[in-house]
Image (spheres, helix red, strand yellow):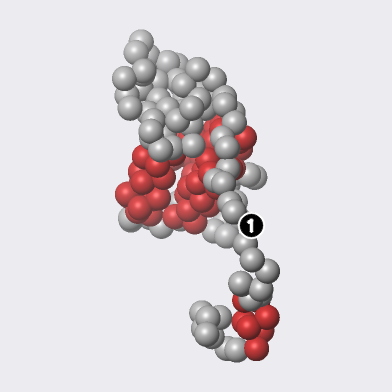
């Protein structure tokens, strides 16, 4: 890693990031082995918290939040796919994947970390009433009997 300049972010330089991406596995092979590796090595440097008045909330125990895990996994998988697109891949990733997911993820009111301002706090799942038996059919059985899986009649 290059020497850090005063006031410079900690992490890889742009040249090191580009070298990592160019020197990686062939298309169709993952650069990171899992979402944890992606978050620890790349995401946390690309998406800084910015400070207490940034309007963003982050939980260091992000992996304990089902919504965060799902969102970050989708951001990672999109990055893995789009990094091979030389012209618009990363722009597409930022505009259509990372930016909207980060806004939803770190929203201080509705995001999964909204209650984690002073450390991790578990979320309560949505409450559900008991559903009367027979109200819903097993749609998987209908899908096996038809060529149109979206036919819900």
Q: Is residue 132 left or right of residue 20?
A: right
Foreground pick, 73 / 152:
152
On screen, 72 above or below 152? above
Left or right of 33 on screen, residue 91 = left
Left or right placement of residue 34 versus residue 4 in this view: right
Near mark 1 (Cα within 10 A), the count class, few <14, some 14-19 or many ≥20, is few
Determine which quarter of the picture holds residue 66. top right
* Badge count: 1
Label 1, secondary structure: give it: loop
Front in this rendered view, residue 153 or 6:
153
Residue found at x 36% / y 10%: 6
Q: Residue 144's x, y, as percent?
A: 66, 84
Q: Closest to the observer: 75 or 17?
A: 75
Q: Residue at x 66, y 73 (%)?
A: 134
Furthest residue in direction top, as rendered: 6
Q: Is residue 106 left or right of residue 145?
A: left
Residue 59 position, x and y percent, is: 52, 27
Q: Is residue 76 something that shows in the picture?
A: no
The foreground one among 143 and 79 is: 143
Displayed quadrant of residue 57: top left
Residue 110, image x and y in percent?
40, 38
Q: Is residue 146 visible?
A: yes
Q: x, y percentage for residue 118?
A: 50, 17
* Residue at which label 1 appears: 130
Give the residue displayed 32% in from the left and 24% down from the top: 54
Residue name at image x 44 percent, y 55 percent: 82
């Amino acid at each position: 890693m290059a020497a850090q300049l005063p006031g410079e972010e900690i992490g890889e330089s742009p040249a090191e990031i580009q070298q990592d991406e160019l020197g990686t596995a062939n298309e169709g092979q993952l650069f990171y082995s899992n979402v944890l590796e992606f978050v620890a090595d790349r995401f946390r440097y690309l998406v800084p918290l910015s400070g207490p008045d940034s309007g963003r909330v982050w939980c260091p125990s992000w992996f304990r939040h089902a919504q965060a895990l799902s969102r970050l996994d989708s951001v990672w998988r999109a990055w893995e796919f789009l990094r091979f697109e030389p012209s618009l891949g990363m722009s597409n990733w930022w505009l259509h994947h990372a930016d909207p997911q980060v806004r939803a993820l770190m929203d201080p009111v509705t995001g999964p970390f909204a209650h984690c301002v002073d450390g991790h706090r578990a979320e309560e799942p949505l409450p559900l009433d008991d559903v009367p038996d027979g109200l819903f059919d097993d749609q998987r059985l209908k899908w096996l009997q038809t060529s149109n899986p979206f036919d819900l009649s």
